[in-house]
Amino acid sequence: MSLYVTLDEATLEIKASETKLERVHIGANLRHDQLDAVVTTAWLEDPKFEHNIDPKPLLNKREQLSFFYRLAKDLKAKREVVRGKPENFNRPDYNFRLVGNNGAEPTGVEQVQISVRQRGAPLDLIVSEAMILANSTWGSWMAELGVPGIYRSQASMLPGVKVRMGTKAMPHAGIGVKSYAWSSSPLRRYVDLVNQWQIIACARHGKTAALAAPFKPKDAELFSIISSFDAAYSAYNGYQNAIERFWTLKYLQQNAIQEVEATLFKDNLARADHLPLVLPVMGAQGLPRGARVLVKLGDIDLVSLDIHGTVIDHLDAQAIAVDDDQDDEDTVSGPIAIAMDVSEPDACEPSSTQEAPAAP
């Protein structure tokens, strides 16, 4: 399923869009981890700028990537006008690599390597803006044809107003688009696959798509999918956060790290500045949100994933801005709850052990 967008090359104004069902040959697979050091802002914006790094994997894509970067910046700027304020994704993404298991199932003793990929890097921006354009365009198209889909919406950016999932196209204030339907990652999320089934009906049947789409308006099964997806998505996120926290704590142990620089953000919680770690700290009373501090780490419990810290120094006299939009993405701040049945098993029944879901 391909989205073709026609735009004015000079102004970047979108004139039309078209969806096609086709097979597409992949000419080049450009990987962030291999090319972020090459595809920099200077390399994209200045044709005379050259790196000392060999850019052969780009296969002469510099001109095309430069245009896509210009388009991505324009799309982002227009969304921010609707959004009412700039996006401030100032926290990096972290990549985990385990050394020593040679691809086998981890045992917990592997050497942990944690690297950083800054969000908003040029390649990251190009990909994210293309996905937002596709998801918002397809979402609006389904609504125009009367075809129900699974949408994400946010009524406003006021504190406490959360993103919701539903079957009607409504504005997403946090992204700055009039409608938003996850559709671009059908191998990763079931919701995207469901939306693609609906969009395929739109591509094949046009104005009569509502009669041919797998899910009809007010279809109870569509509401059931949303409910089931929410539960599964939360469970997977909880598990992902828990395993990342485990390997972060192992990293602290392996490197004998006893102090970290961190930023306070709410409820006496601190986020490490250079590691994917959130932890409760003592001694933060009276300090403003966004204050940077030096934290002495306490004992690590790898079973409950628990760690606490104590503020031992103030690094900034004034608080720095903390993006409210990112607070919901915090990793597990530990500990997780664990429940075990330790009674003697019946002679005819196996013993049972239960572990509760990870919870912040």
Image (spheres, rainbow, N blue to C red):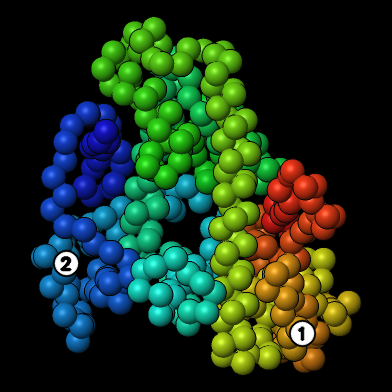
Q: How many marks?
A: 2
Q: Which residue shows up at 31% across the image and 42% down it?
A: 13
| Quadrant of res 133 | top left
Q: Compare residues 132 and 204 and report the one nearer the observer.
A: 204
Marks 1 and 2, how far apart at CA: 46 Å
| Quadrant of res 248 | bottom right
SS at mark 2 in the image: helix
* 1 vs 2, front mark: 1
| Quadrant of res 232 | top right
Q: Compare residues 354 and 315 and report the one nearer the observer.
A: 354
Q: Which residue shows up at 56% across the image and 82% down it?
A: 251
Q: Which residue shows up at 68% across the image and 43% down it?
A: 162
Residue 125, given in percent of the width and then of the height, sits at 38, 59
Q: Which residue in the structure is indicated by mark 1?
A: 298
Q: Which of the numbered marks, if any, corresponds to residue 58?
A: 2
Q: Amino acid at mark 2?
A: Leu
